[in-house]
Amino acid sequence: MSRFSSCLTVRPRRVGRALGVLAVAGLLSACSGWGDKLPDVSTLGGLVTPYKIDIVQGNVVTREQAQALQVGMSRQQVRELLGSPLLASVFHADRWDYVFTFRRQGQATQQRKLTVYFKAEALERFEADELPSEEEFVSSLDVKRKSGKAPAMQATDEQLKTFQERNAAPAGSQAPVPDAPPASTSYPPLENPGSVR
């Protein structure tokens, strides 16, 4: 029986180590599932976020530009109206794609597409997403915070009198004497007139 009892004896150190490793592995795997639910440490709990610049990519095509397209226009006329296409494929030589993407922090990405089809070097048809007017597009770019009332740029007569009274010279003082004009300066030439290189 002594043979079997030695097999059944478990060393407490090994058990402690095994339990410790299992506990650490369990904690680490449990934390991985909370990544999307916990606030990001880099944003200080969501209170402060780093600045991300606005990203504008592609060609801006407005509703007015799309309305100016006419069937039968040449490739050059379309290029002058819409600009160079973002994608002109070798495999689809009769198709130009204009894609515009605008990403701004805290807002959904805006993406608009316009595809122009040619047949025999003339515009055959075009397909477009809902395009903004030029005015709508410009107003969507304006992110200036409207501050309160603009400061007055011209002083009133009352403000001018107050300023003059505050800055009036004492009765016994003289007006400051202007400094003497600087002596005229004359510099020698940078190179000797007779030297030639």
Image: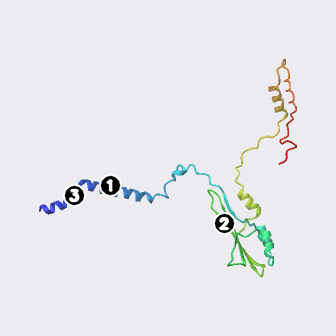
Which image quadrant: the N terminus? bottom left
Relative image position of residue 19 (x, y in whole percent):
30, 56
Q: Amino acid at mark 3?
A: Val
**Percent of width and height locating residue 7:** 18, 62
Cα distance in 3D space between marks 2 and 1: 52 Å
In space, the residues marked 3 and 1 are separated at their CA atoms by: 16 Å
Left or right, residue 11 beside residue 157: left
Residue in the picture at 52% in, 53% down = 40
Give the image location of residue 107, x and y in percent: 63, 59
Judging depth in this view, the residue of 187 and 22 nearest the camera is 187
The residue singled out by tag 1 in the image is: 20
The amino acid sitting under disc 2 is Gln
Residues under labels 3 and 2: Cα distance? Answer: 65 Å
- Earlier sequence position, callout 2 versus callout 1: 1
State the residue position of label 2: 111
Is the residue 143 above or below the residue 168 in the image? below
Q: Residue 118: which disc?
A: none
Which numbered tag is attached to residue 10? 3
